[in-house]
Amino acid sequence: MSIKQALISVSDKTGVVDLARSLHQSGITILSTGGTSRLLQNEQIPVIEIGEYTGFPEMLDGRVKTLHPKVHAGILARNDLPEHQSAMKNMDFADIELVVVNLYPFEQTIAKTDCSLEDAIENIDIGGPTMVRAAAKNYQKVTVITDPADYPLLLNEISANQGAVNSASRFKFAQKAFSHTAAYDSAISNYLTAMNDDGDSSDFPATLNLNFTRVEHLRYGENPHQKAAFYRDSQPVSGGLAGYHQVQGKALSYNNIADTDAAWECVKSFENPSCVIIKHANPCGVASADKILTAYQHAFATDPTSAFGGIIAFNQPLDEETASAVLKQFVEVIIAPQITDKAKTVLAQKSNIRVLTVPLEHTSHTYDLKRIGGGLLVQTPDAYRLSLDELNVVTRKKPTERQMADLLFAWRVAKYVKSNTIVFCRDNRTLGIGAGQMSRVDSAKIATIKAQQAGLDLAGSVVASDAFFPFRDGLDVVIEAGAHAVIQPGGSIRDDEVIAAADEQEATMVFTGVRHFRH
């Protein structure tokens, strides 16, 4: 069934002039509204303004213009039902076979810092979603387009099918349209239900609606008996892993994606050329240096055994020299802001290695989410960046300038290690990492053992603990291993005992007042 009449009413006018011109050249009558109509008329494209079409002018500052039986009957009438066709004939209504609509920019409006509740309300579209839903419901007759990116596909279909769009494409466009209006309504609900009684916005809406788009099915989940898929946020943050570009390699697995995200978020937190190696969501080596080759070598040296089959992240473009060094180990994924052409040639020698690029940007998600049985835990992201003037030296001995730099480095690493966390560092590199233990003293012992196994000397090192030392035993382990300075949040009822233990052993201790649990 060929398209004879189209209704075009768009807020985002990207590509709409070229689309309308092509539709007109295909002999399709164009109905339009407001600003869209004026734009097309200025471009010498014949259109029928919607008020002229319905015989009812726009009113209420444009709030009522397409909400008219002649419009919605034209969209909703079914060609396979005689009573529908009889009613249309009796009313002298014509079918509308194509609806091209996108909605008022609600999310862009509320993203503005000076957005008022009145501004937000005025940008809630009524007629647009009504037309979109009507067209999507009647997809067997009507083609509905909500995304300018689909204009070329629409025109190709019309050209290839003698003015028609095939049923499979109409159904896909309808699916996309319903998802579009669902996401739109979700944004409105999230915004309005976050309002307190006094009109101020709280951090969390009373009803939280989430919208993600499936990118791909994955081979399986964490384990082969689990099914899995990867979804992208409807508005992904810039610089997040979801925006990756795959340069080469096999398809990413569920675990690859989870571990690579951990690596990428950690390496982005460093300013100097840095490398992070992740294994099972934990850093097993982190280093910063003057160049990324040295950073990689130092990170790898922390725990060469665990680095086998790991994820390697860089915060600088990956060069040929570093790529050649990385290929000496078994690696699952490499991620960097850029890969040089020479590095790509090197990496192509092992075509199965997954190589990704992501722009190096530092925006954060609005929420961190964790599923539980029958519910969802929601929190703001742990984006806290500790500054030097927030530190509180609580021991008699004060840290040197070099120790303070190492303490801040260790603290930054500890944020990305599963709790309980102990991290030994020196000279902007990790020496031993203890992660995910039920007791902090066990993490301290494991970090010490890891350093010994790697042949790394802990004398003169510093230690970061993601939460306070509940007893002096963990502190005693790290000082006995060679640490001279410790950074921890403080806040234990035994802080005085732990501080006294540090003074007793002539170590320096710094409190942050902030903890970084990571479960």
Image: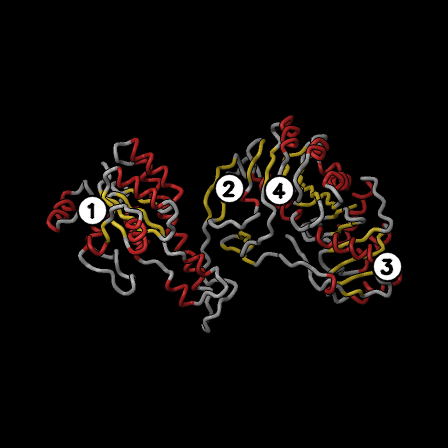
Provide the residue designation for mark 4.
337
- Residue sitting at 57 percent across and 37 percent down? 223
* Foreground: disc 4 or disc 3: 4
- What is the secondary structure assignment of the residue under circle 4? loop
| 140 or 16, nearer to the observer | 16
Provide the residue designation for mark 1.
77
Furthest residue in direction left, as rendered = 90
Provide the residue designation for mark 2.
230
Give the spatial CA distance, label 2 vs label 4: 21 Å
Name the amino acid type tagged 3: Ala
Q: Position of residue 361 (x, y in %)?
A: 59, 49
* Foreground: disc 2 or disc 1: 1
* Foreground: disc 2 or disc 4: 4
1 to the left or right of 405: left
* Foreground: disc 1 or disc 4: 4
- Residue sitting at 26 percent across and 41 percent down? 24
Going from N to C along the chain, the mark reached first, 2 or 3, is 2
Give the spatial CA distance, label 2 vs label 1: 38 Å
- What is the secondary structure assignment of the residue under circle 1? loop
Label 4 Cα neighbours within 10 Å, binned few <14 / some 14-19 / many ≥20: many
Label 2 Cα neighbours within 10 Å, binned few <14 / some 14-19 / many ≥20: some
